[in-house]
Amino acid sequence: MRVQLRKGLRSIRLRDLGLVMVGMLFFALPARADVLINGAGATFPYPIYSKWFWEYRQVDSSAKFNYQSIGSGGGVRQIIARTVDFGASDAPLTDAELSKAPAKLLHIPTVMGAVVVTYNVQGIATGLKLTPVVLVDIFLGRITRWNDARLATVNPALVLPADDIIVVHRSDGSGTTSIFTDYLSSVSPDWKQKVGQGKAVRWPVGLGGKGNEGVAGQVKNTRGAIGYVELAYAEQNKLPYAFLQNQAGHFVAPSLETTTAAAAGATMPADFRISLVNQPGKDSYPIAGLTWILLYQQQRDCERGQKVVKFLWWATHDGQRYVPELLYAPLPADVVRMVEATLKTINCEGKPLLVSQ
């Protein structure tokens, strides 16, 4: 009896020891850790990027994005310095900027959007129309009151107040500014010569606001103000925006349809660096633009690089279904096919990071 008991106790101890060892092995296995991916740049696409980062956690819960919405200028500087995994810009890099990068940088278009002219004019909740000449003269400081005869001529149905016009512009390096000044330069040789186009320019008049958020806030809180922001920021702040006269002579409002129309006649180059402002077509909104993720073709960290590339594939495919609800226009199908080919060239240690798409 005692022998059997000793055998039974020894059997139990061995079984318990086995369970303990299995438990130790289980807890010794590394937990699936988050992979932190750092990005910085444009405020223009920040609403859709935030949405994408949230939704993508359902696809890959280990991919954790830290995106700093600091403006395109900051994003360009940081990706060139390689202090982030990706940059973001609403202005394509110039050849001079690309030459400063330590390796080949790619432009990956993500969405299209409209830069709107928003305003805070007493008694005018909607319906303000602006021609290219009038818009240029406002931002040059030549039209200084809302009841100026040139504004009244374009808007005969509106009662315009005698308030001063307060111009609001970006104070930081901005792709939104680049799109806006690209448009003004395209319609006015005078603007092109005196001010020019770029992420940061020497403004003739006005107050500065940081980011699309800062400009929207300044306009909302300043009677008589006029400024430029991405469409989603105007909608979020319940700000009105102007109908702009396009190249065909039609006054059009910014929308998904008019932004898409602006891109319809454009031929996309292989490197995706293109301007969509002042495009032909009766329905084309004149201040439209692409926004890009900036990414090195040769990635140094294979794990993070693969995470970013897989996210971009998702964003330019499944992620496009979230685009219209945030007032951006999806990428055209032919552009998506070009993006696919470009993403397949991104590699690490000589091996492509997309192997099963």
Image (cartoon, rainbow, N blue to C red):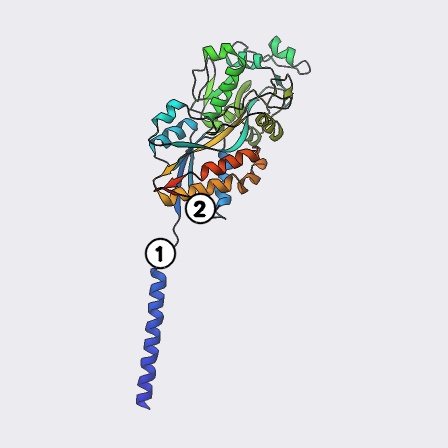
User: Label 2 crowding class (10 Å Cα cut-off): few <14, some 14-19, many 20+?
Assistant: few
Query: Who's the residue at 33% across and 68% down the image?
Result: 21
What secondary structure is found at the residue carrying circle 2?
A: loop
Residue 63, given in percent of the width and then of the height, sits at 43, 46
* Image marks 1 and 2: residues in contact by CB distance under 8 Å: no
Q: Quarter-wise, where is residue 331 in the image?
A: top right
Left or right, 68 with respect to 159, comes to left
Left or right, 35 with respect to 280, comes to left
What secondary structure is found at the residue carrying circle 1?
A: loop
- Mark 1 to mark 2 CA distance (whole Å): 26 Å
Mark 2: amino acid: Val
Residue 286, given in percent of the width and then of the height, sits at 57, 21
Q: Nearer the viewer, residue 239 or 197?
A: 197
Q: Mark yes or no: residue 49 visible.
A: no
Q: Mark yes or no: residue 30 visible.
A: yes
Of marks 1 and 2, the one in the foreground: 2
Q: Nearer the viewer, residue 311 or 134?
A: 311
Left or right, 343 with respect to 152, comes to left
Q: Which residue is mark 1?
A: 30
User: Label 1 crowding class (10 Å Cα cut-off): few <14, some 14-19, many 20+?
Assistant: few
Which of the image's four quarters has the N terminus?
Answer: bottom left
Q: Quarter-wise, where is residue 263 in the image?
A: top right
- First of labels 1, 2 by sequence position: 1
Residue 67, given in percent of the width and then of the height, sits at 43, 37
Q: Which residue extends farthest bottom?
A: 1
Query: Who's the residue at 49% across and 38% down the image?
Result: 340
Residue 41, given in percent of the width and then of the height, sits at 43, 31
Q: Which residue is mark 2?
A: 355
